[in-house]
Amino acid sequence: MRLDKFLCDCKLGTRSQIKKDIKSGLVTVNDVKILKPEQHIDENADRICYKGQPCVYEKYVYYMLNKPAGVVSATEDQHEQTVIDLLGQQKRDDLFPVGRLDKDTEGLLLITNDGPLAHDLTSPAKHVEKEYECHLAQPFDDRQKEQLEQGVDIGEKALTKPATVNILEEKKIVLTITEGKFHQVKRMLSAVGNEVIYLKRLRMGALTLDESLPKGSFRRLTEEETENLRK
Ligand code: URA
């Protein structure tokens, strides 16, 4: 990783300030003064000091991705572009998506290296809410709403847990579920005689998709977003 990026990740200042500080000789790597911001370092092995103080690399990182269709929710794939590939320069071996969205599903995806948080967010025992915008092939009616709110048979041992439905238009709803079975939303709509033709995740627990993020873009979570997710 570049030295200036490392120091930025340690939250020691803006990239431009850090570059200036490096050029002014405020940074050492293994006790050697380094004046080039683009110098590559090994963040796991090198001892980096800023103004004489050792730098602590942040343990966990959190990105919100606005997943586009056509990309798979995996860390690597032989043939397909993955959500981790979309991170470009921020791509790291320890990052993974929290839960899976289908290849054709868009919207909110959390990418992190925080295993314990990911476990909490995806554990069936925690009932974390996931909110989806669904565009449907058929008009949606009150009978379908009632069925989804009560729980439907999608071929699992038990009916689905009661969902919340908000009807936006004749063929557009927001569905909130607390489970995360394979193709769950599509199977639920199919179980009530409808069909999902477009699916977008809007929210997971306390984390809401930042609609100003263009499709395929990502950003770091704010400290407030990270705190709220941990609660
Ligand atoms: N449910 C689905 O059917 N697909 C998704 O991608 C997410 C939830």
Image: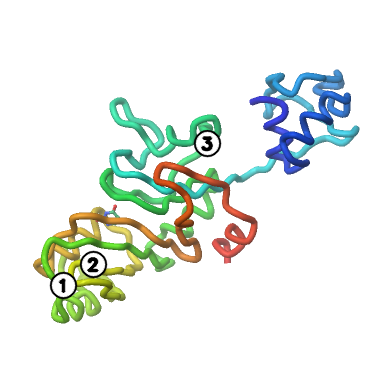
- Among the 4 quarters of the image, the one containing residue 160: bottom left
Q: Mark 2: which amino acid? A: Lys
Judging depth in this view, the residue of 16 and 39 nearest the camera is: 16
Q: Secondary structure at mark 2?
A: strand
Q: Secondary structure at mark 1?
A: loop
Placement of the C terminus among the 4 image quadrants: bottom right
- Among the 4 quarters of the image, the one containing residue 43: top right
Name the residue at the right extreme: 52
Q: Read off the residue under disc 2.
A: 172
Q: CA distance from mark 1 to mark 3?
A: 42 Å
Q: Earlier in the sequence, mark 1 or mark 2?
A: 1
Of the numbered discs in the image, which one, if any, rests on residue 27? none
Q: Mark 1: which amino acid? A: Phe
Callout 1: CB less than 8 Å from ligand 1: no
Q: Mark 3: which amino acid? A: Asp
Placement of the N terminus among the 4 image quadrants: top right
Q: CA distance from mark 1 to mark 2?
A: 8 Å
- Among the 4 quarters of the image, the one containing residue 204: bottom left
Residue 195: horizontal and vertical position, in percent?
A: 14, 60
- Residue placed at 54% from the left, 62% from the top? 229
Q: CA distance from mark 2 to mark 3?
A: 37 Å
Q: Earlier in the sequence, mark 1 or mark 3?
A: 3
Q: Read off the residue under disc 1.
A: 140
Q: Read off the residue under disc 3.
A: 94
Q: Secondary structure at mark 3?
A: loop
Q: Earlier in the sequence, mark 2 or mark 3?
A: 3
Question: Going by the image, does 108 lie left or right of 176?
Answer: right
- Residue placed at 37% from the left, 39% from the top? 74
